[in-house]
Amino acid sequence: MTTPLTDALAGLGAARLRVTFHAETPLDLGPFAGFPLYGALKQHTMRAGCLAAKPCLDGCVQPDTCPYGHLFETAAPPDRTEGGRYRDAPKPVVLHLAEPARTAWAAGDRLRFEVVLVGAAAARAVPALGEALRAVEQYGLGGEGPPGQVSLAALEVVLPDGMPQPLGSAAGVPLHPLAALAPEPDGARLALHFESPLRLRRAGRWLNEDDLSVEHLAEALVRQLDLLARFHGDGPLGPDTEPLLDAARRVTVVQRRLRWTRRDRRSGRHARPIPMDGVTGHLLLEGVAPDLTRLLALGALVHAGSKTTQGLGQVRLVPLT
């Protein structure tokens, strides 16, 4: 369904890659699988895609053309910073886990996840990402313990109808409008599941399970989509986003089951755990307007809050009968 939001995002293309690893040995990916998966993708994409004579350990020297630089050291183009108002561009990659609460896989199990790429330059980085995924076969995958061995069972691109097809050896993948890749549930009654820690900051502090509201989530998603469109699409969403926030304020929350979940990421650079805590659980909503449903569906694709590149802020919408 076309809405003002989908019209505003018409120039923002995206691609969904679906990855399936076969666990050859047991895998223990620590407190959250997104952290070691993201680390492996980043490390091996640098090896496969860095265009410099030596890998750039302290910042990318060719961020506009290097696939590693564009995905993981994303620089804001000078003509889109609005005089320095925006210093950083959002990374055009989101990690989406099929089983976000799972941390261990037995030998023979399948580990599935998706990589959402936003913008034409990100889609052109697919060959380097493919090499990075094949490098995981060689070097293994692990959390805080020894790496386990995996094999790449499937690498597919997900079409707007939700069907996957094998990814060929082309220089990139076809882009589709971002909204076309975000399935939208029917009806005004929805369950909103926060499947990995949602980290939203307001007035200098993280919102906890008592603070979080639908309006807070809508505000965060509008800002995130605006930044993605600004730096990786045709331009910002525009000023007419207030109706979306009004729709969020009018929603009735009929059930609220949220909790504060702790997830620590081990930092090799700082040699200490870094807290990645956030809100998980679910809300049951009534009176959800179509435009707000579209916004939440987009949030299920690109996630919300901080560290979405590592799989945090993953949400899922389920229609209620």
Image (cartoon, rainbow, N blue to C red):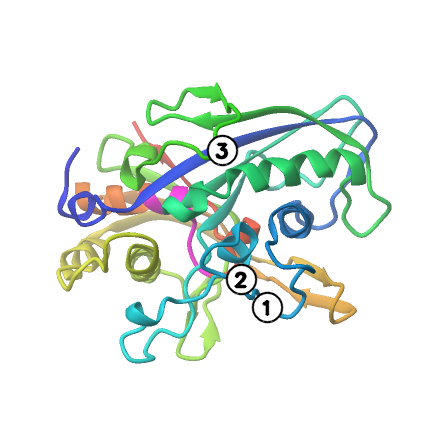
Residue 278 in sight: yes
Dot 3 corresponds to which residue?
17
Dot 2 corresponds to which residue?
73
Estimate how packed mark 2 is, as few (under 14), some (14 to 19) or many (20 or more) residues with alpha carbons within 10 Å. Answer: many
Please state if 3 lies on the left or on the right of 317 as rendered: left
Q: Amino acid at mark 2?
A: Glu
Residue range in magenta is 298-305
Q: Nearer the viewer, mark 1 or mark 3?
A: 1
Q: Residue at x 74, y 71 (%)?
A: 270
Q: Helix, strand, or loop for circle 1? A: loop
Please state if 34 lies on the left or on the right of 256 as rendered: right
Prevailing secondary structure of the magenta residues: helix
Instruction: State yes or no: residue 304 in magenta.
Output: yes
Label 3 to label 2: alpha-carbon separation: 20 Å
Estimate how packed mark 3 is, as few (under 14), some (14 to 19) or many (20 or more) residues with alpha carbons within 10 Å. Answer: many
Residue 73, compared with residue 113, is above or below; it is below
Instruction: Determine whether label 2 and label 1 are within 8 Å by CB.
Output: yes
Dot 1 corresponds to which residue?
59
